[in-house]
Amino acid sequence: MDDRNNREKSDRARQAAEELFKPAHREAAGELATATSNGATSPEQAPRRQPRIFAAPPRVPMTAPVEAAAEPKPIPRKTVGRHRVSTVPPTQNGRVRALVTYGMTPAEVAEHYGVAVSEIERIIGGASTSNRPR
């Protein structure tokens, strides 16, 4: 009797597992009505669904010639003049040294900060030369 119960349990478990892995049957109300009206009962015999195609409005030919659009005129920018500062703030000294160390010339750095080249050279000269690559 136990063998019979075990066999029934294993059969039920096998059927449950098979149900899990079966392809899902998606039957919409419209498809079900169509299938029953055609006499087809299985999903393999159901008619293929038509793709949705949206109608585009017909193109209207241009009757009047259209002039080519004129290119927009560039808006003149106001030049923002940097005010000349006599010194670089002490908080920027490390940055000035780094800019010169990594390839900018003192003249470029001076132009960037709006100071004289002598100010940049003063900052560079105050740095210890042990940090500069040779």
Image (spheres, rainbow, N blue to C red):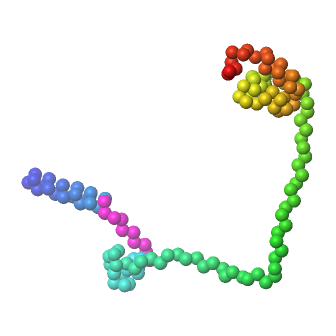
Q: Is residue 98 visible?
A: no
Q: Residue at x 90, y 46 (%)?
A: 78
Q: Position of residue 128 (x, y in %)?
A: 73, 15
Q: Residue at x 81, y 32 (%)?
A: 108
Residue segment shown in magenta: 21-30
Looking at the image, which residue sits at the far front? 134
Magenta part, dominant SS: loop
> In this rendering, is residue 5 above or below 51?
above
Asked if residue 65 lies left or right of residue 46, the reply is right
| Front position in the image: 130 or 83 | 130
Which of the 4 image quarters holds residue 81?
A: top right
Residue 29 magenta: yes
Asked if residue 34 lies left or right of residue 64, the reply is left
Which of the 4 image quarters holds residue 82?
A: top right
| Front position in the image: 83 or 42 | 83
> In this rendering, is residue 25 above or below 102?
below
| Front position in the image: 62 or 121 | 121
Q: Is residue 85 visible?
A: yes
Q: Position of residue 51 (x, y in %)?
A: 49, 76
Asked if residue 84 lies left or right of residue 94, the reply is right
Q: Position of residue 107 (x, y in %)?
A: 83, 29
| Front position in the image: 117 or 50 | 117
Q: Residue at x 27, y 57 (%)?
A: 17
Q: Position of residue 131 (x, y in %)?
A: 68, 18
> In this rendering, is residue 35 above or below 109?
below
Q: Quadrant of the N terminus?
A: bottom left
Residue 36 magenta: no
> In this rendering, is residue 65 above or below 127?
below
Which of the 4 image quarters holds residue 129?
A: top right
Q: Residue at x 78, y 29 (%)?
A: 105
Q: Quadrant of the C terminus?
A: top right
